[in-house]
Amino acid sequence: MLKLYEKYLEVVDKYLQKYFEDQKPFIHCKEGCTYCCETGDYPFSRLEMEYLMAGFVKLPAEIQGVIKKNIADLLNRKPQEGKFFHKCPFLIDKKCALYERRGIICRVFGLAAFDIVDGKKVVVIPECGKQGLNYSEIYDSSNSTVDMEKFKSFNTGEILPCPPDLNNMIKKVAKGIDDLEFGEIRPMLNWFEKQS
Ligand code: SF4
């Protein structure tokens, strides 16, 4: 299944490249900026997590130790209930320790996506857009809205759906991987909690 997933990732990366190209006028990502990995809950499916951890066991013992400690510290701070936004435990010295194996959510970092909230389609911009970075050109901080007319006037491509809809959409265009099962999706940290 992981081999099939690797094939799938090739399609995903190619697919997303087009979005990053199309939306260049809004993208202000640059090397060394780790904003997206500094605060989030990082939803990962079972399959994405298996793939990430298959890379983890190959990391040098010292790096594995740092990651394990990061995870343990986070689990200690994690509240029993509600969302918990935190720095990703795989981010070390402002670099992803498993960049090639990062999840789908990590691959769309920086792009705007649409989501369905209370039956309505809403555009969600990356958090950095509220700090003057990606998509800040179309973000109105006075009422926390995205100006879609302005977005269209830049003549860019479509807005992506959020994962997991994105996964389903890409599965449709990727040949031979229809039986790829992602499994349950959980915030990353939940995968490390002891299951009762
Ligand atoms: S897995 Fe890597 S890319 Fe994804 S949030 Fe963590 S550090 Fe960032």
Image: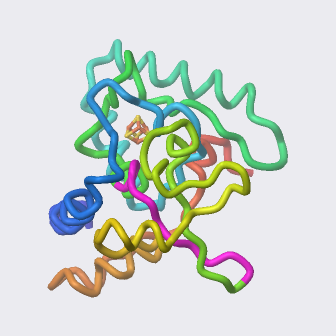
Q: Which colour scheme is used?
A: rainbow
Q: Residue at x 33, y 65 (%)?
A: 154
Question: Ligand 1 shows up in which quadrant of the image?
Answer: top left
Q: In the picture provided, is 165 more to the left or to the right than 26?
A: right
The stretch drawn in magenta includes residue 109: yes
Q: Outermost residue toward the right?
A: 81
Between 148 and 101, the one lying in front of the other is 148
Between 126 and 196, the one lying in front of the other is 126
Q: Outermost residue toward the top?
A: 62
Chain part drawn in magenta? 108-118
Q: In the picture provided, is 190 more to the left or to the right than 5?
A: right
Q: In the picture provided, is 15 more to the left or to the right than 152?
A: left
Q: Residue at x 80, y 49 (%)?
A: 82
Q: Where is residue 48 in the image (x, y as percent from the top left)?
A: 39, 56
The stretch drawn in magenta includes residue 37: no
Task: Please count the marks in the image.
Answer: 0
Q: Where is residue 184 in the image (x, y as percent from the top left)?
A: 54, 67
Between 64 and 42, the one lying in front of the other is 42
Q: Can residue 6 be seen in this view?
A: no
Q: Which residue is drawn at 59% across and 57% down?
A: 186
Q: Quadrant location of residue 79?
A: top right
Q: Residue at x 32, y 24 (%)?
A: 32
Q: Indicate the quadrant containing the N terminus: top left, top right, bottom left or bottom right.
A: bottom left
Q: In the picture provided, is 14 more to the left or to the right than 91?
A: left
Q: Is residue 79 visible?
A: yes
Vertical relation: 150 (above or below) 105 = below
Q: Position of residue 31 (x, y in %)?
A: 26, 28
Q: Quadrant location of residue 29?
A: top left
Q: Quadrant location of residue 5?
A: bottom left
Vertical relation: 10 (above or below) 85 = below
Q: Position of residue 125 (x, y in %)?
A: 52, 56
